[in-house]
Image: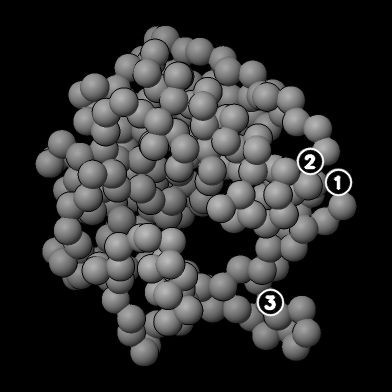
Amino acid sequence: RALHDDLVSAGVGVECLHQRNDVATPVVLHQVLAGGKHRFRFRCPTCGRRFPKARPLPRSETANVPLANVFFFDRPSAAAVAIAEAHREAGRLVVFEPSSKGVAHLFRAALAAAHVVKASDQRLKASEGGQTAGFRIITHGLRGLTISHGDESRQLPALPIRDVVDTGGAGDWTTAAFLARLPSLCPDDLSLETTADALRSAQAVAAISCLFAGARGLA
């Protein structure tokens, strides 16, 4: 209920948010450390109780998921891949940002279904990103990021930041601002030029977010 009310206060539509008594909302504690660093905790620091973890949507419930302008997912579950493939077939933009590789064949299917794959160079090797025919965005931390499509690629250096407070959430701000800055959400309209321009603006938003404590501090 707290998450529902929070989304409503932010102006997010919650028509497709289902509340079930048998599913606990995932919780992650974001701890801000000195020097702009952070870490995530998955247990209560007081009692040690493990927080609820994310659970994948059952494959049987994918038929109830409506089509969106953009489908973003970060976990290659069977349901998520099925939804991604349905969006791709309908001509909707699919963005995959793997938080983990999960099951190998589902990970490969997720790469194939995505128009845009974004990951750090620690999480996704260039050869793995090449399994998708779409756009690949590989982030390199303080060295910026690389965007590639086919045989073309472009390097975007990181923006300098002074007095960093917290880098947590910068990657999420990059993705959100990138999608917001694209001149069109139609996959056929994507080009290396428009994608690079949107990413440059997104890097600026991510840099600003590092001046605030917490992943949502900028909001």
Which numbered disc covers residue 87?
Answer: none
Q: Position of residue 75 (x, y in %)?
A: 42, 54
- Comparing marks 1 and 2, which lies closer to the viewer? 2
Decide if residue 192 is in sight here: yes
The residue at which mark 3 appears reads as 43
Q: Residue at x 45, y 42 (%)?
A: 176
Q: What's the CA distance linking mark 3 and mark 2?
A: 27 Å
The residue at which mark 1 appears reads as 35
Decide if residue 128 is in sight here: no
Considering only order in the chain, which callout, 3 or 1, is on the residue closer to the N terminus? 1
Q: Residues within 10 Å of mark 2 (few under 14, many from 20)?
A: some
Which quadrant would residue 150 be assigned to in this image? top left
Q: What's the CA distance linking mark 1 and mark 2?
A: 7 Å
Please state which amino acid type lies under the numbered disc 2. Answer: Val
Q: Which color scheme did the rendering employ for the protein? A: one colour
Which numbered disc covers residue 164?
Answer: 2
Q: Secondary structure at mark 1?
A: loop
Between residues 124 and 42, which one lies in front from this camera angle? 42
Please state which amino acid type lies under the numbered disc 3. Answer: Arg
**Vertical order, 21 against 207 (above or below):** below
Please give left or right for residue 49 compared with residue 174 in the image. Answer: right
Q: Secondary structure at mark 2?
A: loop
Q: Secondary structure at mark 3?
A: loop
Considering only order in the chain, which callout, 2 or 3, is on the residue closer to the N terminus? 3
Q: Position of residue 118 (x, y in %)?
A: 47, 35
- Comparing marks 3 and 2, which lies closer to the viewer? 2
Q: Tags 1 and 2 in contact by the CB under 8 Å rule?
A: yes
**Vertical order, 35 against 184 (above or below):** below
Q: What's the CA distance linking mark 1 and mark 3?
A: 23 Å
Q: Quadrant of the N terminus?
A: bottom left
